[in-house]
Amino acid sequence: MKQPTGYDAFIPNELPPNPPIDIDDEMQDLLSQADRKLGRLDGITEILPNPELFVTMYVKKEAVLSSQIEGTQASMIDMLNTQDANVSDYDFDNIREVTNYVNAMSYGLKRLEKLPFSLRLIREIHQVLLKNVRGYTKNPGEFRKSQNWIGPAGCTLENASFIPPSPGEMEKAMGALEKFFYEEDHIPALIKIAMIHAQFETIHPFLDGNGRMGRLLITFWLCQKQILSQPLLYISYYFKQNRSEYYENLNKVRFNGEWENWIKFFLKGVAITSDEATSSAKAILSLKNKYSQILYEVDNGNSSYQRLLDLLFKYPIVSKKQIAELLDVSEPTGATICNEFVNLGILIDVTPEKKRYKKYRFDEYVSILQKGTEL
């Protein structure tokens, strides 16, 4: 639609699409696979020894991946390193963006217990997401009052690749989207959230943080609909691996109304990511059992060994001093236990030469966690 100042801004049609989505045999098969694999992933928490810890690590992984899509230079290793209060050799700005994503996820899920999935909740979560990070000057928690646009760095309205609705039209579109959240329809939940995500990204209601916010919405929707009991799906992994196809499909929805290709792409992502997350969970469980048995055979009744193994699934990068603090033992005792874990191959020394304070990593576990998050 032509704006008074001369540029064209895109005005999306309301949902659901008209004509309706053509759920052909291929889409039905993809939906069935995605539903089945997502259900299998959700059930995996029932066999894990510490599901809360597992969920925490998966949320961190999704946070790293989603932030990387926006250009944040922080890896899973960086995120895990921040768990040691003595560490100071990482980029605080990049890590804070990832931490904010984790906080926004936690905040939103807690608020969902009392507040329905709504524009109000979206604004609240956005405020947490942008607190004291890049974009904090761009009205966190408020829908934009000025025009924004999408394109390469440095582009203007004249050469932008996509111009979302004007502020007035944006408010109307977000109101219509909220209405769609609650419409009594027979649209399968995974297809509906695929539509909601695409529509949100098209409307682009904030001056900054729309990509991360749009990916958070997927998790909140799945949890509110009780399709997931925990935020286990890190679908940003799939979007990152297929970034060009992701943006291409969104643009085809906007300009050609090709909803079917986008939804099929999305459903494939849910299935692939669910499989990946389930495999990771099984690998973590196998790792725990393997080293529990090894420690049982060598610990001579020393319960600190099993306690440290459990703690390493929360703090997989540690120093000898940190081990002593975690176990509440003397530093010499902590050092002895650490050395034993190194001898057993559980921990490896990852400290650069000549650095005074050595760090040790539960490398097999970190390798499982960091898959796909490498910079």
Image (cartoon, grey):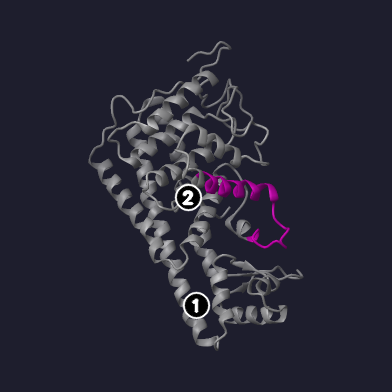
Q: Which residue is mark 2?
A: 237
Is residue 346 shown to the viewer in this render? no
Q: Who's the residue at 46% across and 45% down the image?
A: 113
Q: Quadrant of residue 147?
A: top right
Residue 216's x, y, as percent? 49, 43
Query: Which residue corresponds to the image point at 52% horizontal and 39% vertical from the top-left?
Result: 213
Q: Label 1 to label 2, Cα distance in Å?
A: 28 Å
Looking at this view, is 117 or 265 the one in front?
A: 117
Dots 1 and 2: beta carbons under 8 Å? Answer: no
Give the secondary structure at mark 2.
helix
Residue 188 in the figure: left or right of residue 136: left
**Which amino acid, by three-letter code, is at mark 2?**
Tyr
Q: Is residue 322 left or right of residue 296?
A: right
Which type of secondary structure does the marked residue at label 1 adopt?
helix
Position above or below: 154 against 238 = above
Q: Look at label 1 and name its amino acid.
A: Tyr
Q: What span is colored magenta in the figure?
A: 81-108
Label 2 Cα neighbours within 10 Å, binned few <14 / some 14-19 / many ≥20 = many
Upstream in the sequence, badge 1 or badge 2? 2
Q: What residue lies at 54% left-to-right and 44% top-to-bottom? A: 69
Relative depth, front residue between 167 and 279: 167
* Outermost residue to the front: 114
Residue 291's label in the rendered image is 1
Query: Residue 198 in the image: x percent, y percent?
Result: 43, 34
Q: Position of residue 366 (x, y in %)?
A: 54, 64
Vertical placement of 323 versus 224: above or below? Answer: below
Decide if residue 188 is on the left or right side of residue 204. left
Q: Is residue 333 magenta?
A: no
